[in-house]
Image (cartoon, rainbow, N blue to C red):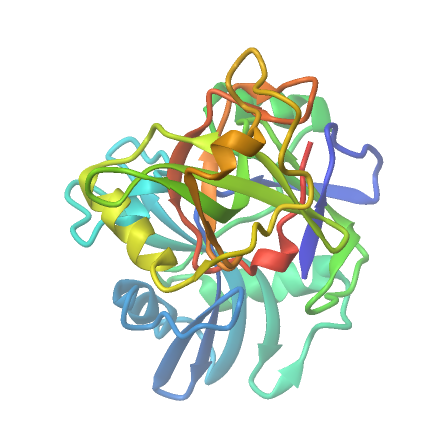
Amino acid sequence: MMAVSAKTLPVGPEWSYEVKWDGYRTQAIKDGGTVSLASRNLKNITKQYAPVAVAAAAVAAKSALLDGEIVALDADGRPSFQALHHSALDGLSLVFYAFDLLHLNGRDLTRLPLDERRAALTRVVSGSPVLLSDALPGTADQIAGAVRELGLEGVVAKRRRSAYVAGRRSDSWVKVRFARHQEFVIGGYKAGAANFDSLLVGYYDGRKLICCGKVRSGFTPHSRAQVFAAIHGLETPRCPFANLPTARSGHWGEGITAEEMTQLTWVKPQAVVEVSFAEWTRDGSLRHAAFLGLRPDKRAREVVKEG
């Protein structure tokens, strides 16, 4: 189940509010003494995040399916999305925040109201290393203010009586991001000395992939090599963006002219990256975009403009 994006939180007694954790959406499946982890696009990530599997093995159930987020926390307890891409998490802790319980000891809970699933989840994770992402106390404004002050990514509002609708984006879950970043699809790149100088990224509007700018900053040599490995072999002679070329480059250099397109290499739109940015420009491009990390857990066709 996925949330829809909004600029403000819905208000009313039917809503509850949780922290939006800056990590990888993951389901932990316990079956007797075996635990496996699945990303949002159903990739098996158990070996990659083995400490999380060990934590999930300790929950109080013979079998369970937990929905949540893998998060890397620094010494102050703050999430670090970029740290999830490092093979060595020096000075950081890898944790699993569980926010839903879908199956328990052979029973399907998805049709139960969220409040009942949460109550069962609280009992299941109690005493285990799995952390509970529970509903926050206070009004929507109070919660938004506190989460902003802590520098966390955002808040997810959920209807207390809602069932769990698997595989769908539902308005029973509403996410509001306070940090300006989201996922984008790589559709091309400008070649550099070793691999690439910049990426061209975009989002889907219906069936059309819309280019929204270039990403040059935020890369380390390691992350640049990771991204290039992810798109190597996806080269294609055809531009995947429906809105290119633009008539001219904009004031911030966000446009792509026909002349510039001859210098670019196009790739099939399959790889997804997380990008931070200062704002959307008037012509729909990203200003001051910076790379944050690869998102192998996200499907390219699900990437849309979030605001």
Whether residue 94 is visible:
no
Image spot of residue 127 (x, y percent): 38, 62
Q: Residue at x 57, y 33 (%)?
A: 258
Asked if residue 232 lies left or right of residue 11, the reply is left
Image spot of residue 228 (x, y percent): 31, 51
Quadrant of the rendering where the N terminus is positioned: bottom right
Q: Say above or below: 113 vs 198.
A: below
Asked if residue 279 lies left or right of residue 130, the reply is right
Image spot of residue 154 (x, y percent): 57, 33
Image spot of residue 131 (x, y percent): 42, 54
- Residue found at the far top of this picture: 251
Q: Residue at x 51, y 73 (%)?
A: 42
Q: Residue at x 59, y 16 (%)?
A: 250
| Residue nearest the viewer, comparing 274 with 286 | 286
Q: Say above or below: 208 vs 282.
A: below
Whether residue 221 is visible:
yes
Q: Residue at x 79, y 52 (%)?
A: 172
- Number of dots carrying numbers: 0
Asked if residue 263 lies left or right of residue 123, the reply is left
Residue 198 found in image quarter: top left
Q: Say above or below: 25 vs 190.
A: below
Quadrant of the rendering where the C terminus is positioned: top right
Q: Say above or below: 196 vs 109.
A: above
| Residue nearest the viewer, comparing 82 with 112 | 82
| Residue nearest the viewer, comparing 56 with 293 | 293
